Image (spheres, rainbow, N blue to C red):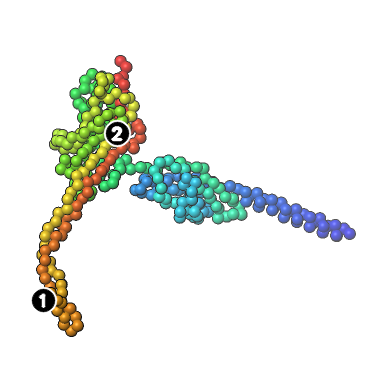
Amino acid sequence: MKRIMSGIAVGAMVLGSIAAFGVTTASAATTTPTVVLSGGSAVFGISPGTITATASVAGAVSFTAGGVAITGCTAAPTATVTPFIALCTWTPSAAGPIALGATFTPTDTTDFGPATAATFNVIVGSPVQGTTPNPISLYVDTIVASGSTGVLAPEFGAGCEITSEFIVGQTIVFRVYGNDSALGGAVLTPLNVSTATVTIPGVATPLALAYGNHGGAAFWTAPLKTGTTTGLYDTLGIISYKVTFNTIAVPAVTKKVTATKLVPLLRNGKHVIKNHKVVMHRVSYTKTVVVTPAVAGGVGSFTSNFNPLSQPTLNAVPAA
């Protein structure tokens, strides 16, 4: 009877050990790894971005953009040794802010559970200058005109300097140059530009850009006079503007050349037949060929997408 009781006690101890070990294993399975997102910088329509997920253990990552799974990145594996990094190359569908996300599945599902990364917000870049519809590229900056004195005098130099900060009473000059790849990268000049303007909200008539020599370099300019007198621009804050260029259509260049072709041989207005076939002969004729294709007139525009602090701003005259 004592032996039987002893056996029962030993069995109970073994079962107790197994039960205790099982609790420990179940507890390990609830361990949640970490996964952190970084990177993701991209330019819409120009270059893709690379999102980096760094986990605390090995596994696979499913990436999302705006809550939608990114094609080709639904099971991106991490490295098998530290650092446990998974990469996703993505092509954004639009410019602007977007939330990136990721869920992580560990390789060792016995000791670790799934994890979700904190939302990672990025801003997809937008090309500062756009071309519509032809490939006209434009460069634009703003300068303070020379000649102002006193409180209106430029902070640095004597004027004709690139700046984004202006004071009411100063004259702001828009400077532009550009090229047209449809014309082989030709510089935009009055020879290939029909109109060039700067449109500013609150200014009734768009500013006409004029082309000319400026200290040995030729480019387009248009002044915007500011001040408190009627007719002058005086809206404080960021100056929104749009530069628009219209290019001149270029006709095709053609020339006439001599060529030959086969035509049926006729006698008395009838085809000549030989061996049951129509006899052909070669004749010369003149045709017109295109030497240089025509180039349609295009429209190029520029609207600044820089950080607001970098855009031209009109300020009140500083207090004395």
- Mark 1, Cα crowd under 10 Å, few <14 / some 14-19 / many 20+, is few
Residue 102: mark? none
Q: Mark 2 points at which residue?
A: 241
In the image as oriented, which residue stretches furthest toward the bottom? 275
- Mark 2, Cα crowd under 10 Å, few <14 / some 14-19 / many 20+, is some
State the separation of the CA atoms marked 1 and 2. Answer: 75 Å
Where residue 77 appears, as percent x and y from the top left, is: 49, 55
Q: Type of residue at label 2? A: Tyr
The secondary structure type at the circle numbered 2 is loop
First in sequence: mark 1 vs mark 2:
2
Is the residue 262 above or below the residue 200 in the image? below
Q: Which residue is drawn at 11% across and 66% down?
A: 285
Q: Type of residue at label 1? A: Asn
Is the residue 145 above or below the residue 291 in the image? above
Q: Residue at x 25, y 23 (%)?
A: 231
Which quadrant of the figure contains the C terminus? Answer: top left
Indicate left or right for 167 with 97 as reference.
left
Q: Name the residue under label 1.
A: 268
Rendering quarter of residue 137? top left
Where residue 268 appears, as percent x and y from the top left, is: 10, 76
| Number of marks present in the image shown | 2
Q: Toward the viewer: 184 or 124?
A: 184
Where residue 303 appears, as percent x and y from the top left, is: 31, 37
Q: Toward the viewer: 245 or 212?
A: 245
Which quadrant of the figure contains the N terminus? Answer: bottom right
Rendering quarter of residue 241? top left
